[in-house]
Amino acid sequence: MNIQKNIINIKNALSNSCKLIVVTKTKPIEVLENVYATSERAFGENRVQELVEKYEKLPKDIQWHLIGHLQSNKVKYIAPFISCIHSVESMNLLEEINKQALKNNRIIECLLQIYIAKEETKFGLSETEALEILNSEKINLLKNIKIIGLMGMATNTNDISIVKNEFSRLKTFFDSFHSIKKENIEIKELSMGMSNDYALASDLGSTMVRVGSAIFT
């Protein structure tokens, strides 16, 4: 495993505007210390319990991203430190994030997760549901969150044309959101692309790719 070499190769395949989020799920602390030594600071976790444990043991200048499904009753555990929550899929969850952010005197950045895959196991909002949230009166009351973009997970398939179509659709949808301007909404980040398709995602306009296995091989 040559973590530094793998990270260099991945970043060379990304556009200058695309950031790497190192997906750290299931990886032990000593391996993540090696990632930290390469100067990477954006780490992504799927599970709240694992995220909290790693936050406590690793340097505090790491920017932690929650990229997995988030239950409302778990928000309180990450609210004191989380940098960005990628997987917001309901107004109820936004309200809970806002509530816990207020308790911690923070503004927490969030991405709306959009359902783009042809798989029932994936989570996310429809385009209509996302627009309803962004245009709602209720969103104006949430002063301790900031919606900064969208996230999507493509279908897990070897058919690159399916993935390309899903990413392209999400990028078009993302572009259409730029006209929505509110105090707590600034659509600027598009989180799409993982280990198998990060280069394609970057080419199609992603600003964040979530890569794990391609780094730890």
Image (cartoon, rainbow, N blue to C red):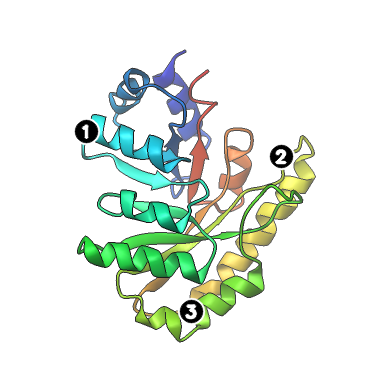
Helix, strand or loop at mark 1: loop
What kind of residue is marked 2? Answer: Asn
Q: Position of residue 39 (x, y in %)?
A: 29, 30
Mark 2 or mark 3: which comes first in sequence?
A: 2
User: Toward the viewer: 165 or 109?
Assistant: 109
Q: Residue at x 21, y 60 (%)?
A: 104
Can you see residue 107? Answer: no
Q: Residues within 10 Å of mark 3 (few under 14, many from 20)?
A: few
- Seen at 30% across and 23% down, the residue is 33
Q: What amino acid type should be assigned to the residue bearing mark 3? A: Ile
Check whether the beta carbons of the residues at disc 2 and disc 3 lie within 8 A of each other. no
Q: From this view, report whether residue 212 is shown above or below residue 210.
A: above
Q: Position of residue 53 (x, y in %)?
A: 32, 34
Q: In this view of the protein, which residue sits in the foreground, 43 or 92? A: 92
* Alpha carbons under labels 1 and 3: distance apart: 36 Å
Q: CA distance from mark 2 to mark 3?
A: 31 Å
If you read the primary sequence from the N terminus, does the residue marked by circle 1 or circle 2 appear first? 1
Residue type, label 1:
Pro
What secondary structure is found at the residue carrying circle 3? loop
Q: Which label is found at residue 156? A: 2
Q: Which mark is residue 180?
A: 3
Q: Residues within 10 Å of mark 1 (few under 14, many from 20)?
A: few
Q: Which mark is residue 59?
A: 1
Q: Neighbour class for label 2 at 10 Å: few (<14), some, many (≥20)? A: few
Asked whether, in this view, residue 84 is left or right of residue 130, the answer is left
What residue sits 32% from the left and 18% below the top?
Answer: 30
The one nearer the camera, 171 or 47, is: 47
Q: Residue at x 38, y 55 (%)?
A: 75
CA distance for labels 1 and 2: 33 Å
